[in-house]
Image: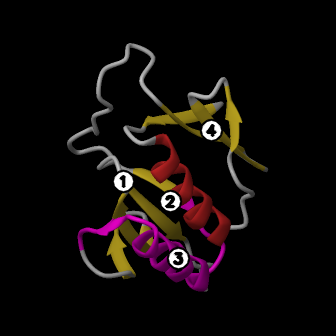
């Protein structure tokens, strides 16, 4: 459905360090800089980017918005969360763990990135 997702970053290098670490935990290579104002992360199923706002104003986060990254294992979810905390992220919501809901059983970990964007890693265990 999506070609790419881009989030604003107030400190591009702090955000690059954070996203290199958490996306590295999910098997995605380091960001590649473009025009000195944004980094692109290319995965097998899409593109994620961080960018200084083009209008020159501060990047702001969406209240109520969350960007979820797919994780193949529970261990990747924990590596994502640990890498995020170690690289300027802030834990939010409940600790990493299983959640039950209409979509079934999910394993999730939530963070706020250095610019305040709410992100998560999500592992969907196989149905038995």
Q: Looking at the picture, how far across and down is residue 118, in whole percent? A: 33, 53
- Examine the rendering and report whether any part of residue 106 can be seen: no
Task: Give the residue number, with chain letter if any, for mark 1.
Answer: 114
Q: In the shown orientation, is residue 22 left or right of residue 118?
A: right
Label 1 – label 3 distance at C-alpha:
19 Å
Magenta stretch contains residue 7? no
- The quadrant in which residue 104 appears is bottom left
Label 4 – label 3 distance at C-alpha:
23 Å
Label 3 – label 2 distance at C-alpha:
15 Å
Task: Label 4: state its secondary structure.
Answer: strand
Q: Which residues are magenta?
A: 69-93
Magenta stretch contains residue 76? yes
Task: Give the residue number, with chain letter if any, for mark 3.
Answer: 77
Residue density around tag 4, few if under 14, some if 14–19, many if 20 or more, within 10 Å: many
Q: Nearer the viewer, residue 102 or 79?
A: 79
Who comes first in sequence, dot 1 or dot 2?
2
Q: Looking at the picture, how far across and down is residue 64, in whole percent? A: 23, 45
Q: Nearer the viewer, mark 4 or mark 3?
A: 4
**Disc number at residue 39?**
4
Who comes first in sequence, dot 3 or dot 2?
2
Relative vertical location of residue 106 with respect to residue 66 in this rendering, above or below? below
Q: Nearer the viewer, residue 95 or 39?
A: 39
- Examine the rendering and report whether any part of residue 28 can be seen: yes
Q: In the shown orientation, is residue 38 left or right of residue 107?
A: right
Q: Nearer the viewer, mark 3 or mark 2?
A: 2
Q: In the shown orientation, is residue 2 left or right of residue 42?
A: left
Who comes first in sequence, dot 1 or dot 3?
3
Task: Give the residue number, with chain letter if any, for mark 2.
Answer: 18
Residue drawn at 27 percent across, 38 percent down = 62
| Residues marked 1 and 2 touching at CB (< 8 Å) | yes
């Amino acid at each position: 459905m999506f070609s790419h997702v881009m989030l604003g970053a107030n400190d591009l290098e702090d955000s690059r360090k954070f996203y290199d670490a958490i996306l590295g935990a999910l098997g995605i290579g380091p960001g590649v800089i473009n025009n000195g104002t944004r980094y692109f992360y290319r995965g097998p199923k899409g593109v994620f980017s961080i960018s200084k706002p083009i209008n020159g104003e501060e990047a702001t986060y969406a209240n109520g918005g969350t960007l979820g990254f797919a994780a193949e294992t529970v261990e990747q979810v924990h590596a994502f969360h640990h890498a995020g905390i170690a690289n300027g992220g802030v834990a939010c919501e409940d600790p990493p763990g299983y959640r039950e809901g209409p979509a079934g059983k999910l394993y999730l970990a939530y963070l706020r990135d250095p610019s305040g964007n709410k992100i998560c890693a999500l592992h969907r265990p196989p149905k038995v």
